[in-house]
Amino acid sequence: MIYLDHNATTPLRPEALEAMLPWLGERWGNPSSPHRFGHDARVAVEGARERIAACVGCRPSEIVFCGTGTESDNLALRGSAHALRPKGRHLVTTAIEHHAVLHTCRALEAEGFRVTYLPVSAGGVVDLDALEASLGPETILVSVMHANNDTGVVQPVEEIAALTRERGVRLHVDAVQTAGKLARRPGDLGADLVTFSAHKLYGPKGVGALYVREGTPLTPVTTGGGHERGFRAGTENVAGIVGFAEAAARTFDGLEAESRRVSGLRDRLERQLLETVPRVSVNGAGSTRVPNTSSLSFQGIDGESIVLGLDLRGICASTGSACSTGEPEPSHVLLAMGLSRREAQGSIRLSLGRATRDEDVDVTVAALAETVQQLRRISSVR
Amino acid sequence: MTNAPDEPKPAAGTPTGPVLFYTETLLEHFRNPRNVGELAEADTDGFGLVGDPSCGDQMKLWIAVRDGRIAKIAFQSFGCPGAIATSSMLTELAEGKPIEEARRITDDDVIEALGGIPENKKHCSLLGVQALQVALGDWEGRQAAKAARS
């Protein structure tokens, strides 16, 4: 099997699995318990918090562990909106956000908030002028992803941070697709809130984190005990948090060399594909992208059929966000970039990772060429 | 709902992913679709072009009618695996059938012949049947025009 769907999830690092096992086995205490057995788990959680803070470039006290990246996004958006409601009811985000942000914005609209969805360029980059123009006295939060999950296109988050800071507007950045891929430390982006997910950087599923800059107003979404400084009630996922920290430490260590290696493979894959297969285009090719992602549009054929053709040849690819697979709607990200519905429908995403090797690229290009040719023979569209 | 008897169980070591959402029969039609292509103008007695606006799928279907039966059938499809496989299966079901029988083929017949289809793909299976209905209508129209001329 050749796995080229790392933006959906990554394999758990063996060291992370190893680090997790005691906390699923004999060391099963509750970190909040008032005895030494529980304290053992508390020490593990706090040690993990320190390691993650060191990776992303913040204070340990600024890390709030959550159940998933989606939950962290929910806490950032709902928590900010509810905390800042007296100040204003306007939020700004982009048309290309993950559904974790977009659908949360829809829910906030139903609560009476107003949301601006910023357009992006043909290259998939958010329009900074439109962003600046959208900020008003009522604006309380801007939420922009660091890189898009479908295209890998990196957003000008630091420039956005300069704009929001100037106006006293809070900034949330979903860094799920960049943490462990880009050299820039997420804590240095200038954002007030940053979302992370463990399973996108070779950690376990079921654990995420929200960086909450000290002093950022935030109302908890989950109420209960005083866990995570009151921001996220519920007994900590000790094993998951420990695995997250182990995976993050190892992924951030040596990140630059690995990113160079993977971007070399991605670029070679795209070059070979453009040479071998006619009528294919790379979405966001001219923009700054995370090293591992390639969004490809093939004229006249359907992305799901390409993905199945690849699957039957032992290659795991995706039509885009795994969260929207099965929906008839083509990628909202590609539509926002100005692709027609049919172009967006003919798109797939390849996302490379640590296990991807040179020969995988050759095999994938050959399999794609074969699949595309076969589907074009069947197609009623030229 | 109980498992259909012809629903194949995935063998150990079968790759996971979308493959398991489809039956072996459907996958076989996706890999080797029957009656792909188009009929020459001179051979064509009926043509149907249909699209599904909800997902952008499109299908073209040609029929040749001899002695009241569908003698030849061909299709082209832009769409998902469900659309391709159901179109292929439809042509297999329709080929050689008397017109009246072909007209009565439903999407449930196609789905049953494929051993089932994922719930969210059921709308794809409509295209083939619709295209055949349109092609049969076209054939009737051409017959009527011919009769009026003679």
Image (tube, rainbow, N blue to C red):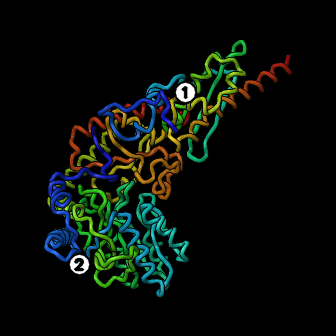
Look at 69% across and 22% down and name the residue there.
Answer: B101
Look at 34% across and 63% down and name the residue there.
Answer: A68
Which residue is farthest top? B67
Please provide percent x and percent y for residue A357: 21, 42
Q: Residues within 10 Å of mark 1 (few under 14, many from 20)?
A: some
Which chain does tag 2 point to?
Answer: A
Please provide percent x and percent y for residue A40: 14, 70
In the rendered image, residues at marks 1 and 2 fall on the same chain: no
Which residue is farthest front? A35
Of circles 1 and 2, which is in front? 1
Q: Is residue A304 left or right of residue A3?
A: right
Of residues B77 and B70, which is closer to you in this image?
A: B70
Question: Which residue is the site of mark 1?
Answer: B113
Residue kind at label 2, given as amino acid type? Ser
Question: Which residue is the site of mark 2?
Answer: A61
Q: Is residue A303 left or right of residue A32?
A: right
- Marks 1/2: CA distance? 60 Å
Q: Which mark is residue A372?
A: none
Mark count: 2
Look at 15% across and 70% down and name the residue there.
Answer: A37
SS under mark 2: helix
Of residues A201 and A187, which is closer to you in this image?
A: A201
SS under mark 1: helix
Q: Can residue A256 be seen here?
A: no
Which chain does tag 1 point to?
Answer: B
